[in-house]
Amino acid sequence: MPVWHETVKEWVSQGKLQIIGVIQEQHPERCELFRQWQAFDWPILHDPINVLNTTAVPIFVAIDQHGIVRSVRPDSGRFAEDFINRDFSDDASNNSKPLTPPRQVNDRPDTDARTQGDVLALWHSPEKIDAAISAYRQALQTSPDDDRSHFRLGVCLMRRFESQKRRVGDFGAAIASWETALAGNPNQYTWRRRIQQYGPRLDKPYPFYDWVDQAQHDIRARGDTPIELPQPPLGAEIAAPTDRFATAKDNAVNPDPAGKIFRDTERLVQISVTTVPSQPKPGSTVAVHIHFVPNPVTRTFWNNESEPLRLWINQSDDVTLNQHFIKGVNRPSAETDEVRRLEFEVRIPEEATLPIRINGYALYYVCEDVRGVCQFLRQDISFSLGK
Amino acid sequence: MHHPALFVRHVLLAACLSVVTAGGFASAQGSDYRPVVGEYHPEITLPSIADGEPVSLSDYRGKKVLLIHFASW
């Protein structure tokens, strides 16, 4: 795509061509950082719910001054001859319907639930993200096999999880919705890529967001301030693909083998476990995402002046782990209350019988504002691979 | 930031779109994105990644456009 940007730069500067981008990703800030890094100076439209129903990218469409499509796969070597320097007449008659929904539906009784969800998700979120989720769920009650509602519900659940309105199970529910959508339409690569961003390295076609560090470095080097990312990519989102499962080294030491550290009985930190895929089969590799959400009721926050969050996963004869002792990273300021995510991968042998139980625990230093107490606590974690 | 004249066009367009019924939204019928050579490209209005403001393909009528659907990865 940057190749096209370079190819047409001169025509754009001469006013002979306008570029318009449409980007399919979940996070607008990451798209904006990419635009800033690449110095794209043309408008980029955001379609996080895939309302256009594009099944793969990139797609290049040459549209003349009358709004008529002249090519859907223009040849960059012949672009001047075939498009820029050519005269086109207004010779089309088909006046098609818009591909995108209106910005308001005004509770019209003839508006279907999925369209209501689209309007709320595109134009009124995050403030109306709960209403968008309700609309898609209503659409799925009427049409349980509507793949697009499943995908868009997943987008909204992920967006809610990344907002202050989060519910602890939203991340896992988003992955499950995307998987259901893709199962209904396995040719939808836009949806497949959304899942693969969180999936195991063996299933990834590329690292996805490994460019972010380089982009931030390059932007700073030219004296600018990079766009801030409220959701910096981490773990699976930046991990390089691989064709071989790397097993854990055995030199990690169990930090609490006798289980003496006090348990977090008040659930000062809420933990959720999500596997990708959510229903793995024998012989597959699974990415395990463990989210740690400081409890808003107790106003819990991380004590960043102590050791960071740690996760221990017990060795098992039934599966192979790529790591079984994982350390998080503290933020620079003394106290923060962000959601933290630790990840590891599991290889399930071909001959395994599912479900397989995985056990471990997390250790963390947290404080809570209600009584003003800071504690070092352990929370046991147990989940199943497969049902 | 958009040019003020463009902003007025956005507002007018949004007002027009707000009275479009669900039946006027092609995506509700559910075909995949397949622009057809020789036909008008259907209207698209989506939020800008820069500021969330609506941007429409028709804002650029009168210019030759290269519409690029892409991803950052």
Image (cartoon, helix red, strand yellow):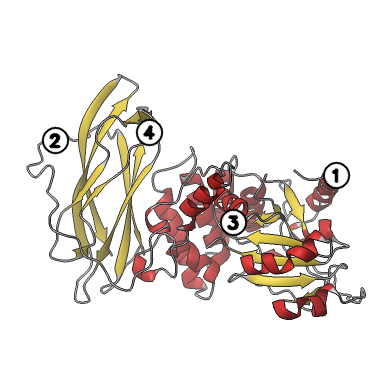
For mark 2, name the chain: A
Name the residue nearer the viewer: A301 or A5.
A5
> Element at badge 2?
loop
State the separation of the CA atoms marked 2 and 4: 26 Å
**Residue A48's disc number:** 3
State the separation of the CA atoms marked 1 and 3: 25 Å
Q: Amino acid at mark 2?
A: Ile
**Residue A261's disc number:** 2
Q: Amino acid at mark 3?
A: Pro
Position of residue A53 relative to residue A341, above or below, is: below
Which of the marked residues, 2 or 3, is nearer the chain's N terminus? Answer: 3
Q: Which residue does the image show at 80% across and 55% down from the upper left?
A: B20
Q: Position of residue B45 (x, y in %)?
A: 74, 56
Q: Quadrant of residue A283?
A: bottom left
Q: Amino acid at mark 4?
A: Pro
Name the residue nearer the viewer: A234 or A200.
A234
State the separation of the CA atoms marked 2 and 1: 63 Å
Q: Which residue is mark 1?
A: B8
Q: Position of residue A104 (x, y in %)?
A: 73, 47
Q: Position of residue A259 (x, y in %)?
A: 10, 41
